[in-house]
């Protein structure tokens, strides 16, 4: 039976990196993706609800993981957080960003 996983992508503003990652999974038969940001001005700001929904949480930088752990320690219990180490230098939908996301996610998601 194919897996179905709920993925959450987190960056700072939820405008470029995490939103691009979310869109990679539009219409995917095995993954449902959402995205959010850690900063007050984020397009969608991450909440405990997002973290509760997600089976796997992908963050773009270590500081995003640190911020989530500081603010949402209880909601993160038993939740894997994967740091992708993708710098904030790519605009939304950038082909290099998409290639980098695919490369880094392939190690964690079998059906990408």
Image (cartoon, helix red, strand yellow):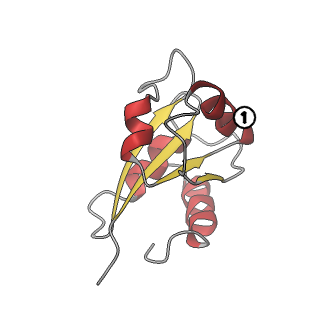
Q: Which quarter shows the C terminus?
A: bottom left
Residue 6 percent across, percent down from the top left:
37, 56
Residue marked by disc 1: 63
Q: Residue at x 55, y 66 (%)?
A: 102
Q: Residue at x 54, y 51 (%)?
A: 78
Compared with residue 88, is residue 58 higher up or lower down, i.e. above or below? Answer: below
Residue 17 percent across, percent down from the top left:
55, 43
Q: Which SS class for mark 1?
A: helix
Q: Which corner quadrant of the image does residue 108 belong to?
A: bottom right
Q: Residue at x 72, y 34 (%)?
A: 63
Q: How many marks overall?
A: 1
Residue 60 percent across, percent down from the top left:
64, 45
Q: Give 44 or 68, whichever is nearer the viewer.
A: 68
Q: Residue furthest bottom?
A: 1
Q: Which corner quadrant of the image does residue 104 belong to?
A: bottom right
Q: Give 42 or 51, whichever is nearer the viewer.
A: 51
Q: Which quarter shows the N terminus?
A: bottom left
Give neighbour class at mark 1: few <14, some 14-19, many 20+ (Cα, 10 Å): some
Q: Give 37 or 77, whichever is nearer the viewer.
A: 77
Q: Is residue 40 left or right of residue 30?
A: right
Q: Is residue 111 left or right of residue 101?
A: left
Q: Residue at x 40, y 41 (%)?
A: 52
Compared with residue 112, is residue 71 higher up or lower down, i.e. above or below? Answer: above
Residue 66 percent across, percent down from the top left:
70, 34
Q: Residue furthest top?
A: 40
Q: Is residue 32 left or right of residue 10?
A: left
């Amino acid at each position: 039976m194919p897996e179905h996983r709920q993925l959450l992508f987190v960056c700072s503003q939820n405008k470029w990196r995490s939103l691009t990652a979310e869109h990679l999974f539009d219409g995917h038969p095995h993954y449902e993706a959402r995205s959010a940001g850690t900063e007050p001005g984020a397009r969608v700001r991450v909440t405990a609800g997002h973290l509760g929904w997600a089976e796997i949480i992908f963050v773009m930088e270590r500081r995003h993981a640190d911020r989530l752990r500081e603010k949402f320690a209880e909601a993160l219990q038993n939740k894997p957080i994967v740091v992708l180490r993708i710098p904030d230098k790519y605009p939304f939908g950038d082909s290099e960003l998409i290639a980098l996301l695919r490369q880094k996610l392939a190690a964690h998601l079998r059906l990408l």
